[in-house]
Image: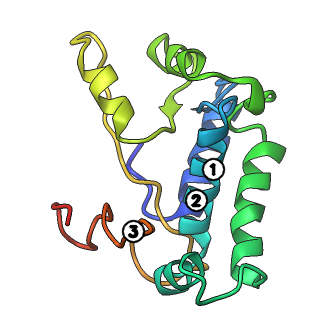
């Protein structure tokens, strides 16, 4: 399988993995409040244009827009298809990691902090990619700026500002 370039392709890949026998195609921790906010931000990043996302985060826009409804629909779709497990909100960080490491789940959705955990074991072979944007949103991969405007990866670069 190749790295998906659109969110819809990632969902097609996860559906295929489920059909091929992966009970939980995407391992992800959902039982910890901070992760729920992380997944919400990710799905908004999939469905919402970067400028609108930043404007709204800094109180210069409205959350009551169709783009954000699409973001929540992405989250609901993952649940409805059971692509990240039937009891997603009960899965803790170690359990999600275990699903991936024991090859019960072919994909592991988490943040960059998880990479350090994985690279410690030389027996674990993996690759990683950024969740791709939806065809419904314009622009490329992106992340939301922090409240002070920092800790955001600049588009098309490898450095942090």
Determine the residue located farthest toward the front in the rendered image.
148
Specify the color scheme. Answer: rainbow
Q: Nearer the viewer, residue 13 or 78?
A: 78
Q: Which mark is residue 41?
A: 2
Residue name at image x 64 percent, y 56 percent: 40
Q: Residue at x 78, y 82 (%)?
A: 64
In x, y percent, where is residue 84?
68, 35
Between the residue at mark 2 and the residue at mark 3, the CA separation in whole angstroms equals 13 Å
Give the CA distance from mark 1 to mark 2.
6 Å
Which of the marked residues, 2 or 3, is nearer the chain's N terminus? 2
User: Which residue lies at the image location 67% right of the left edge and 27% below the top edge?
Assistant: 24
Please give the residue where the numbered disc 3 appears in the rendered image.
Answer: 141
Question: Whole-percent x and y of residue 52?
Answer: 55, 85
Q: Are marks 2 and 3 in contact (CB under 8 Å)?
A: no
Q: Secondary structure beneath disc 3?
A: loop
The foreground one among 46 and 117 is: 117
Tag 2's secondary structure?
helix
User: Which comes before the other along the chain, label 1 or label 3?
Assistant: 1
Front of the two marks 1 and 3? 1
Q: Which mark is residue 122?
A: none
Residue at the limit of the structure toward the right, as seen here: 80
- Residue bearing the label numbered 1: 37
Q: CA distance from mark 1 to mark 3?
A: 19 Å
Q: Secondary structure at mark 1?
A: helix
Are dots 1 and 2 in contact, CB under 8 Å?
yes
């Amino acid at each position: 399988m190749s790295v998906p370039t659109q969110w819809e392709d990632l969902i097609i890949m996860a559906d295929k993995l489920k059909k091929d026998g992966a009970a939980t195609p995407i391992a992800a921790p959902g039982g910890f409040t901070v992760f729920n906010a992380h997944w919400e931000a990710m799905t908004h990043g999939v469905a919402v244009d970067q400028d609108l996302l930043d404007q709204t985060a800094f109180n210069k826009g409205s959350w009551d827009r169709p783009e954000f409804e699409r973001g929540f629909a992405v989250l609901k779709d993952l649940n409805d298809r059971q692509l990240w497990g039937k009891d997603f909100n009960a899965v803790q960080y170690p359990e999600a990691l275990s699903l991936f490491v024991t090859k019960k789940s072919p994909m592991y959705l988490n943040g960059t902090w998880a990479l350090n955990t994985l690279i410690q074991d030389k027996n674990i072979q993996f690759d990683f990619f950024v969740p791709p944007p939806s065809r419904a949103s314009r622009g490329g991969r992106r992340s939301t700026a922090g409240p002070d405007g920092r800790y955001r990866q600049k588009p098309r670069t490898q450095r942090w500002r």
